[in-house]
Image (cartoon, rainbow, N blue to C red):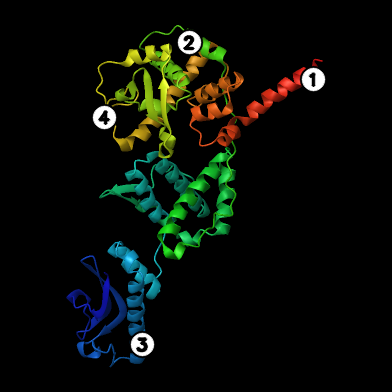
Amino acid sequence: MATIKVTFDRRASNTIKGKKFPLVLRISHNRKTRDIPFNLHLKENQYDFTTGKIKGVINAVRHTKRTIKIYSDVDLWLDEHAGEIKNWEMNRLKSEIEQRFFKKSQSRTILNHGAKYLNRLRIEGRFSTASSYEDALKSLIKYRRHLKGLEDSKIKSLFEIKDDKMIPLEEFKNFDMEIKAIDYGFSKDFKAYLLNRYTSKNTPAIFLRSLQAIMNDARKTYEDLKDHKPLSNIKKKSHANAPTPIDLQDIQKIRKLELTPYTPIWDNRNYLLFMFNNMGMNFFDMAILKRFQFVDNRIKYFRKKTHYEGDYFSVLQNDESLEIINHYLNGQDDNEYLFPIIPNSTSTERLYKVNKGKIKIFNKYAGQIAALAGIDKKITTYTLRDTWTNIGLDMGIDIRKISSGLGHSSVQVTEKHYGRSVSEKILDEINAKITSS
């Protein structure tokens, strides 16, 4: 149980002229002690430890009442919240007492808390989310630079890692700001800046939602921020990107291309077809497949993007995919990657950044493949997912089954993204029947 007492800090470094010691509230908790000063230096005989009375200084009565009241209020608060406080770290307890009873305003900056939050995501292995949230913070810092009339410049990283903790880089501290200073007016101006800066309508919404996630975590962490919700009334709606599928005839053209085996473009054609055959599998999910996940002609995996929701897939491989897999089976250990996309030595933390580079390479070769096959549409890692879905809908497969294959949390998510193309097909059929009669 946490305990307190009023005492002197007798360390020589804090003793001032006339042998006066700082009067402090000493906290003891989990075998640790911390002092909070009353901002009052006294001689030994100027404080009565029995009665708490202060004498021999200006406003002695007022100082006495203040120290006794703070001691009494803190002691009662510790007793009333003992069950909760026993699990706290000492630094948190000290901070809470300083804010509640000493009216000390704690600095809560967006970069400092962002560093704590991103570090937690990093420890959890959620590197993609951490990267997205850092991008949002970068946009905020760029806006702060803009307000100061400074030229825009690329920001590689806002943080560095020291002793396994993330801390803001010194060069950005002048552009940091208190979370409480991010009010409704600032948020509206920031949104306007984002809308003017980015051509994509979704980028501002993504950045604002990411920033809100960081601030929501701060609200839950710090008592003094619990009612601070400046972004709650700012619209952050994303606009669904129109699907960009190719058709089954295009897939057949890609299959029939004569490519030199074991060349980069041949490998990437294999990856393209493998993703299509596996219900439009995400490129990253394919890249990190391990040998042990190929069992009994099935690929078994959790979708990385939604694995926290338990999106598990077990996909029976068709003949084409089995042939592709057999090309790359070369005696790998169970825990080695199935495909030679990402080096086995890549650390978990670097995995996300390495994958981004591999996606660029895939998209480059996908463009070459499209050109060779005479396909006038752009092919990227997203195309195969849209293509698999579109072909399934064209075949009349129930959208609920399509939704399950995509790993969507509900049919509504599928309808939101693909509903327009479904509606267009229905309207086209109706219009054709009416106008041809």
Image quadrant where one finds the C terminus: top right
Residue 124 occupies which quadrant of the picture? top left
Q: Which of disc 3 and disc 1 is earlier in sequence?
A: 3
Residue type of the residue flagged with mark 3: Lys
Residue type of the residue flagged with mark 4: Ser
Q: Secondary structure at mark 3?
A: helix
Local crowd size for mark 4, using a 10 Å CA cut-off: few (<14), some (14–19), many (≥20) = few
Residue type of the residue flagged with mark 1: Ile
Residue under pointer 4: 345
Residue type of the residue flagged with mark 2: Arg
Q: Is there a contact, CB below 8 Å, between mark 3 and mark 2? A: no
Q: Which residue is pictured at 36% across the width and 72% down the height?
A: 80
Q: CA distance from mark 2 to mark 4?
A: 32 Å
Residue 297 appears in the picture as rendered: yes
Q: CA distance from mark 1 to mark 3?
A: 90 Å
Q: Secondary structure at mark 2?
A: helix
Residue under pointer 2: 255
The percent position of residue 381, horizontal first and vertical second, equals 47, 25
Residue 248 occupies which quadrant of the picture? top right
The percent position of residue 318, horizontal first and vertical second, equals 43, 14
Q: Which of disc 4 and disc 3 is earlier in sequence?
A: 3
Q: Which residue is pictured at 40% across the width and 59% down the height?
A: 221
Examine the rendered structure and indicate whether residue 36 appears above or below residue 195: below
Instruction: Give the number of the mark in front: 2 or 1.
Output: 1
